[in-house]
Image (cartoon, rainbow, N blue to C red):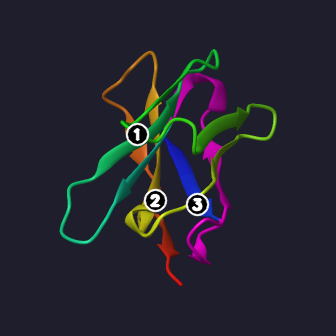
Amino acid sequence: QVQLVESGGGLVQPGGSLRLSCAASGNPFTIYNMAWYRQAPGKQRELVAHMTVDGTSKYGDALKGRFTISRDNPDNTVYLKMSNLEPEDTAVYYCNAVNVMSPQYTFWGRGTQVTVSS
């Protein structure tokens, strides 16, 4: 079991930046692949960025270059740095953890709202 708590969302103007944080507690952080997803109103949840336990990252289509995922294993935290934000980035952003040894153990945070608007 792992608990995930996101923070850092808010209202930002187009072209602005935000950094989201996801603090994990419970089982050892280093056995989980971590990811950020987002869900906009009326749309399906989509992958934003993913990072494995060894630090390999991948990004959703068209997001690499503006978004950067990182993890601080000693601090049990995963981050999402978002730059040059666009109104289309408006969504609830969710943190996700998948146990690498037992992928059926998947956990979600409650999400943090990001609104990009002038």
At a point 49% along the width and 75% down the height, the residue shown is: 115
At a point 43% along the width and 31% down the height, the residue shown is: 98
Using the numbered discs, state the Cα–Cα distance from disc 3 to disc 1 in whole angstroms.
23 Å
Residue position for label 1: 62
Q: Is residue 28 visible?
A: no
Q: Are marks 2 and 3 in contact (CB under 8 Å)?
A: yes
Position of 17 relative to 12 (above/below): above
Residue position for label 2: 93
Left or right for 90, reference 22 = left
| Between marks 3 and 1 in the image, the one whose residue lies nearer the viewer | 1
Residue position for label 3: 6
Question: Residue 97 appears at what percent x and percent y?
Answer: 47, 38
Using the numbered discs, state the Cα–Cα distance from disc 2 to disc 3 in whole angstroms.
8 Å
Question: Residue 71 appears at what percent x and percent y?
Answer: 69, 35
Q: Compare marks 3 and 1 and give the one earlier in the sequence.
A: 3
Using the numbered discs, state the Cα–Cα distance from disc 1 to disc 2 in whole angstroms.
17 Å
Residue type indicated by callout 3:
Glu
Q: The magenta stretch spans which residues?
A: 8-34
Q: Compare marks 1 and 2 and give the one earlier in the sequence.
A: 1
Residue type indicated by callout 2:
Tyr
- Residue toward you, 81 or 86: 86
Question: Residue 115 in magenta?
Answer: no
> In the picture, residue 13 is in which quadrant?
bottom right
Residue type indicated by callout 1:
Ala
| Between marks 2 and 3 in the image, the one whose residue lies nearer the viewer | 2
Q: Compare marks 2 and 3 and give the one earlier in the sequence.
A: 3
Tell me, for residue 84, which label it has, or none.
none
